[in-house]
Image (spheres, grey):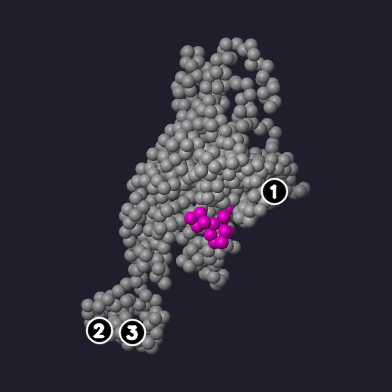
Amino acid sequence: MAAISRSAPQTRGLSPLRRREINWGLLFLSPWIIGFIAFTALPMIASLVMSFTNYNPIQPGATRFLGLDNYQRLVTDPQLLNAIGVTLRFALISVPLSILLPLGLALLVNSERLFGKNVFRTLFYMPYMIPVVAGVMVWGGILNSESGWLNRLIEALFGIQGPRWYQDENWVLPALSIMGFWGVGNTMLTLLAGLQNVPTELYEAAKVDGAGPVTSFFNITVPMISPVVFYNLVLAIIGAFQYFTQAYIISNGRGDPNGATMFYSLYLYKTAFGFLDMGYGATLAWIMFVVVLILTIVLFQTQNRWVYYGGGND
Amino acid sequence: MATLTATRPLATPNRQLRHFTATASITLFGLLVLLAFLAPLGYMTLTSFKTLQQIQDPNSQFLPSSPVNFNYEGKDLPLLQVPLPDGSVRELALFKPGREASVFVDPANPTAAPLEWTGRWRTLEPVYRFAPTLDNFPTAWNQINFGLLFRNTFIIAISGTIGTLLSSIAVAYGFSRFRIPGINVIFLVLMATIILPSQVTLIPTYVFFRTIGWGGTWWPLIIPHFFANAYNVFLLRQYFKGIPRDMDEAAMMDGANPLQTLIQVIIPQSWPALTAVAMFHFFFAWNDFFTPLVYLQGREDLYPISVGLTQFNNVFSTQPGLLMAAAIMAIALPVVIFFLAQRVFMQGIVITGVDK
């Protein structure tokens, strides 16, 4: 906003050279501007409008304006309640893991005592490139309750029968979180870059002051990398809300066992593309957008409590 | 706190030893973590070489191995590990099974008299030999019509990569080099689209593409990428900003217009970033599941690998050997490309990630 008001008076009476620069610049920006209008702004508005109707692509002629009916339906929809529960439970398990595990790996591959650091970095990153579908298939074998390696390991170590991961509604979300381990490479690399940006003088100063590695970690490393952690936290939470592909593949979109994998996005997909109830689907999409937006704003608000931005950014 | 560095020992042998121990133990720990992390790849590879029989074997083996038979007098006899009274264990062929005692033949010396052994033969471990099968690969390839899936995925991925490169280069150049009123706000809007869930635009976009007759075609998977996206623009903009302006000013002096400057000055200096963007998109398209699922419903001839593989996974869920062979074929290309270009690729991510 501030930028507009500051630069608005300048638009009048510009030199031909400046005008030429602006025209060229807008020309280069135009693909994104057009795309933003066509594939983001207009569809968002259309989606909001649809959320007040009973639009169904099979009978577009029968579309009626429903007022707030779709929004009232949200409150009384037991399946929606289940989907929200599944999504929140999953987020509670997977979001902390998706920060802590890559942080541990980043610390490991940043250690000066690790021999062959680059090989480790590359190999820890590599599964991130593996297509999700193939990853789900491979983990399906690992997590197989009878023949899977994980349950055999559990049996060998503790002498107990491991859970029936995919078939047990209490264990399927942890199973999906374990599967998510393979996607930590990207977060690990951004955290690693954060770790490498911490000035070594800080550690040396702390050492002079007699701080051990643990104190240094919590008093120097954690605050210094908190912006990167914050960025990844925002992405992880959004990712949990949009979690779809893995959930779709393990039960072919049915949400088995017993609705335990009927994530919000999957329920939205089922409503809009299974039952073709696109009006209600648009309502679900907008609610999701609003929730994600609120969460992001709240996170940004808490930022100044725990995220440390050293001076001289940008 | 007060114990300042009173004595700072030089590199004594003792210190070197400590250094070495620390390196060795951390590296060993790293190797163990890596082993656990990549174990699923081991499972995938081993299983892809197993026959269904080997997988379903109650004593299923770690390696693709089958129980061995010994042909004796025209009959196939199972080879078992038999503990003998003298404490040794010998591999003998079961000739006459009995409840409490059985008769065995020694394959090393079949002409010798058969051996009487007391004990329940059912408790004995069969002898396994390494016997991998290669059949899963051609079977999976043909069942799933991998050739077609590869072709489809390639067309979608390459077209989208071209689109995303062209558009993201242009837009990033616009953001990095031109003073436009309000450009900071525009840039903020661009970055804000990162947190926008795609679901909120999905349904109207779907209806729109269906209405103009693009349902059941690849266009909805390709065309939107010709309009740039926030991640790629951000990455390229950061990179372009690092290129000294003197060079494009010199080109401008020589009478080059901004487009010529972009092509002659900026692009030739940005190959690492451009490679990263191209690869990001290629991997994205290779992986994308949702868009083809929605737009290509019922058009199996147009499916990319992601959707085709899912279907295969459902049909052949009882045959892990085939599934794992298919998984290997699906991941081979991305993994090979990743290893060939990993340096460029990992640098590109670090550029995007950090300055956020």
Q: Quadrant of residue A9?
A: top right
Magenta stretch? A250-263
In the rendered image, which quarter contains the C terminus of chain B?
top right
On residue B97, which mark appears? 3
What residue lies at 59% left-to-right and 63% top-to-bottom? A170
A100 relative to B270, above or below: below
Q: Chain of mark 1?
A: A
Residue annotated with mark 1: A218
Looking at this rendering, what residue extends furthest in the front direction?
A: A62
Q: Position of residue A25 (x, y in %)?
A: 55, 21
User: Helix or strand or loop: what does disc 3 sit on?
Assistant: loop
Q: Secondary structure at mark 2?
A: loop
**Mark 1 residue type:** Phe
State which tag comes first along the sequence, 3 or 2: 3
Magenta-colored stretch includes residue A259: yes
- Residue type indicated by callout 2: Ala
Where is residue B197 shown, x and y percent of the image? 58, 42
Neighbor class of circle 1 (other Cα within 10 Å; few <14, some 14-19, many 20+) is few
Q: Chain of mark 2?
A: B
Marks 3 and 1 sit apart, C-alpha to C-alpha, by: 68 Å
Q: Do tags 1 and 2 sit on the same chain? A: no
The answer to whether any part of residue A14 appears in the image is yes
Question: Is A82 in front, or is A203?
Answer: A82
| Residue B141 marker | none
Nearer mark to the viewer, of 3 and 1: 3
Question: Which residue occupies the extreme right position in the image?
Answer: B2
According to the picture, the residue beneath numbered tag 2 turns out to be B112
* In this rendering, the label closer to the viewer, 3 or 2: 3
Query: Is residue B11 at least partly visible in the picture?
Result: no
Mark 3 burial class by Cα count in 10 Å: few <14, some 14-19, many 20+: some
Question: Which structural element holds mark 1?
Answer: helix
**Is B83 drawn above or below residue A181 in the view shown?**
below
